[in-house]
Amino acid sequence: MNDDRRFYSHFTRTSHFTRTMRILVAEDDDALRSVLSRGLTENGYVVDTVEDGNAAAYLLRTHEYDVAVIDWRMPKKDGLEVIEGARRGGIRTPVLMLTARDTPGDRITGLNGGADDYQVKPFDFGELLARLRALQRRPALRAGPLLECADLLFDPSTRIITVRGAPVALTGTELGILEVLLRRTPSVLTRRMLAEQVWENEADAVGSNTIDVHVGRLRTKLEGSEARIETVRGTGYRLVGT
């Protein structure tokens, strides 16, 4: 983005969230994508980046994100098409549209197409961060229906796990694993799928026994529940109820 890069250099380091916050950044400009990834990571997000609309649409369909930043002009499929397709598919991920298109008509088109907010380039990173946090504070957008398996219940709006009504204390990583398993039950999730959803650096998790250790601890905390995590040998894990 040549001289415009100076607009993206204002980073504000803040304390990390109480749980992993995952964000999708779809932006075809390499320099801006890198700056966004670095700044958001420094502010506690786990960031997935893509450079074209097809990849963005795929990740929105297959992953759970707290919020997404989608550029309007991208190759293969533009951002507006990505957002409209996601909304038609029932995906409620809060989306901030990022674009150099700054006319009132453009804003109206973007918001009517399903974007929740609209940020014009060039921009101040602090303002972008504030807009993303504001989107995350909208319970109606962020909270999905209650997730359950047997006597295990998860409320996405409060991030509370209960077994037969009693809360279960989990670490952020354990909660991330359990949420992904709950959202896909009774499907089998590979170790790589879990790593991509829960860990910032999935390669480190896949290449070690980190996932197995955390799943083991999670099983211990869920002892007594009718929901259990099964190991599918050679593949991964799934959550089932008895």
Image (cartoon, rainbow, N blue to C red):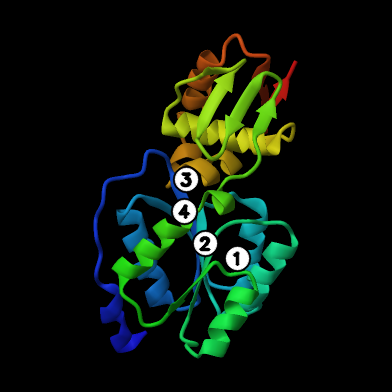
* SS at circle 1: helix
Residue named by callout 2: 68
Q: Which amino acid does label 1 sit on?
A: Ala
Q: Which amino acid does label 3 sit on?
A: Ala
Q: Which amino acid does label 4 sit on?
A: Gln
Local packing at callout 4 (Cα closer than 10 Å; few below 14, some 14-19, many 20+) is some
Q: Distance between the Cα atoms at labels 3 and 2?
A: 23 Å
Residue named by callout 4: 136
Local packing at callout 2 (Cα closer than 10 Å; few below 14, some 14-19, many 20+) is many
Q: Which amino acid does label 2 sit on?
A: Ala
In the image, residue 102 lies at what x, y percent? Answer: 47, 88
Q: Residue at x 47, y 59 (%)?
A: 135
In the rendered image of this protein, does residue 156 appear above or below residue 55? above
Q: Do the residues labelled 3 and 1 touch (CB within 8 Å)?
A: no
* SS at circle 2: strand
In the image, residue 109 lies at what x, y percent? Answer: 61, 82
Q: Distance between the Cα atoms at labels 4 and 1?
A: 19 Å
Q: Distance between the Cα atoms at labels 3 and 1?
A: 21 Å
* Mark closer to the chain start, 1 or 2: 1
Residue named by callout 1: 56
In the image, residue 66 lies at what x, y percent? Answer: 51, 52
Q: Is residue 45 left or right of residue 89?
A: left
* Mark closer to the chain start, 4 or 3: 4
Q: Distance between the Cα atoms at labels 4 and 3?
A: 28 Å
- Identify the disc placed on residue 203: 3
* Mark closer to the chain start, 4 or 1: 1
Q: Which residue is drawn at 57% across and 54% down?
A: 141
Mark nearer the viewer, 4 or 3: 4
**Residue closest to the eye, 131 or 53:** 131
Q: Residue at x 37, y 84 (%)?
A: 1
Local packing at callout 3 (Cα closer than 10 Å; few below 14, some 14-19, many 20+) is few
Q: Do the residues labelled 1 and 2 touch (CB within 8 Å)?
A: yes
